Image: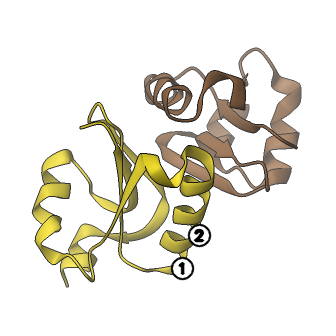
Chain colours: A yellow, B brown
Amino acid sequence: MSKSIFYHAGCPVCVSAEQDIISLIGNENVEIVHFGESKSRIREAENYGVTSVPALVTPNGNVLHINYGASMSEVKG
Amino acid sequence: MSKSIFYHAGCPVCVSAEQDIISLIGNENVEIVHFGESKSRIREAENYGVTSVPALVTPNGNVLHINYGASMSEVKG
């Protein structure tokens, strides 16, 4: 993939980090995925190795867990 | 400040995250600080709110703790 993907769940920590990431790497370079709106993407994120949100998956597939909002178990509820 | 600052301590998690951050935001947009070489910067980082490494402080002063390499207590040894 050419873009990074930022996964989040709408928590305050997530929203703050989202704004920082967009500001740092540019809106055009990152796809934002909100699990509350896209539950079907949860499995994809877990396959990348995402264990908590917010998290950024880089174009080469590395996972950067940024601060800590919620675990994936909490996201799945 | 206009640049972000990436603080780390040379741990494997740090080095991996450093490469990702440079790739994402560009070498010219981030100052890299290695506490092993710049112990005098530890207090500065703590004042920003850095509690573990690796961490990125954005130009507006937000702290993004990225994955987890070591606590600041471990860094200070």
Vertical side of A23 occupied by B67: above or below: above
Dividing the picture into quadrants, the one containing residue B63 is bottom right
- Residue positioned 49% across, 23% down in the render: B19
Circle 1: element type = helix
Residue on which the image places disc 2? A16
Q: Are marks 1 and 2 on the same chain?
A: yes
**Which amino acid, by three-letter code, is at mark 1?**
Pro
**Which amino acid, by three-letter code, is at mark 2?**
Ser
Chain letter of mark 2 equals A
Q: CA distance from mark 1 to mark 2?
A: 6 Å
Dividing the picture into quadrants, the one containing residue A43 is bottom left
Dividing the picture into quadrants, the one containing residue B30 is top right
Circle 2: element type = helix
- Residue positioned 49% across, 26% down in the render: B23
Find residue A12 and name its label: 1
The location of residue A18, given as percent across then percent down, is 51, 64
The location of residue B28, given as percent across then percent down, is 70, 24
Vertical side of B26 occupied by A58: above or below: below
Chain letter of mark 1 equals A
The location of residue A13, given as percent across then percent down, is 53, 72
Q: Are marks 1 and 2 in contact (CB under 8 Å)?
A: yes
- Residue positioned 48% across, 70% down in the render: A14
The answer to whether residue B30 is visible is no
* Quarter containing the C terminus of chain B: top right
Q: Is residue A69 left or right of residue B39?
A: left
Q: Nearer the viewer, residue A28 or A46?
A: A28
- Residue positioned 21% across, 73% down in the render: A73
